[in-house]
Amino acid sequence: MTTQQHTRTDAGLASELRISVMRLRRRLANERHPDNDLSLGAMAVLAVLNRRGEMTLGALAEAESVQPPSMTRTVNCLEEGGYVVRRPGETDRRQVLIAITDLGRATVAADRERRDAWLAKRLGALSADERAVLRAAAPILERIANE
């Protein structure tokens, strides 16, 4: 089977997409803001809090598909750095909510801005047809990622 025939099968497409998505992820990770020393996992937690608002530790662990002890370590680190704060729940004072701070929001924004600028520059070098294909593929990739 030729490479072209292989990529026409679902298994071939899966392999090609996996490789391409992983390479793009690595490139985007390399484009992080130079002043940002946070791990990719810590940045993912900040991004979730920035997008969804305050959450419990358990909900954060579930959102990031990690065990609660791992999330506790990440949140402790973020709290020590001033990126998040803990506060008691309003209806159940025993419940602890994690909320992003202004520093956390600014860190997420700077990181996204830098990576978006890098990617926008690369997209600008593509043809209009290529950009249209990617525009159509983006929601499909999102759906696959969230299944």
Image (cartoon, helix red, strand yellow):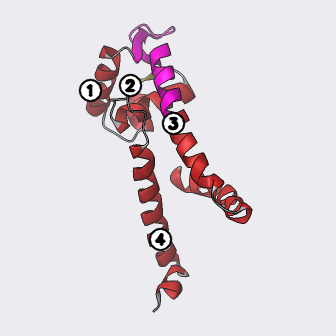
How far is mark 1 from mark 4, CA to CA? Answer: 35 Å
Looking at the image, do the residues carrying marks 1 and 4 touch, with CB atoms under 8 Å apart?
no
The disc label shown at residue 109, or none: none
Q: Quadrant of residue 125?
A: bottom right
**How far, Cα to Cα, is label 3 from label 2?**
29 Å
Closer to us: mark 3 or mark 1? 3
Q: Callout 2: few (<14), some (14-19), or many (20+) C-alpha neighbours within 10 Å?
A: some
Q: Position of residue 15 (x, y in %)?
A: 44, 71
The residue under label 4 is 16
Identify the residue at image location x=47%, y=63%.
20
Which residue matches tag 2? Answer: 57
Mark in front: 4 vs 2: 4
Which sits earlier in the primary sequence, circle 2 or circle 1? 2
Mark 4 and mark 2: Cα distance apart in space: 36 Å
Q: Secondary structure at mark 3?
A: helix
Residue under numbered circle 1: 73
> In the image, residue 142 lies at what x, y percent?
58, 51
Number of other residues with Cα within 10 Å of mark 4, as a class: few under 14, some 14 to 19, many 20 or more: few
As drawn, 67 above or below 101 = below
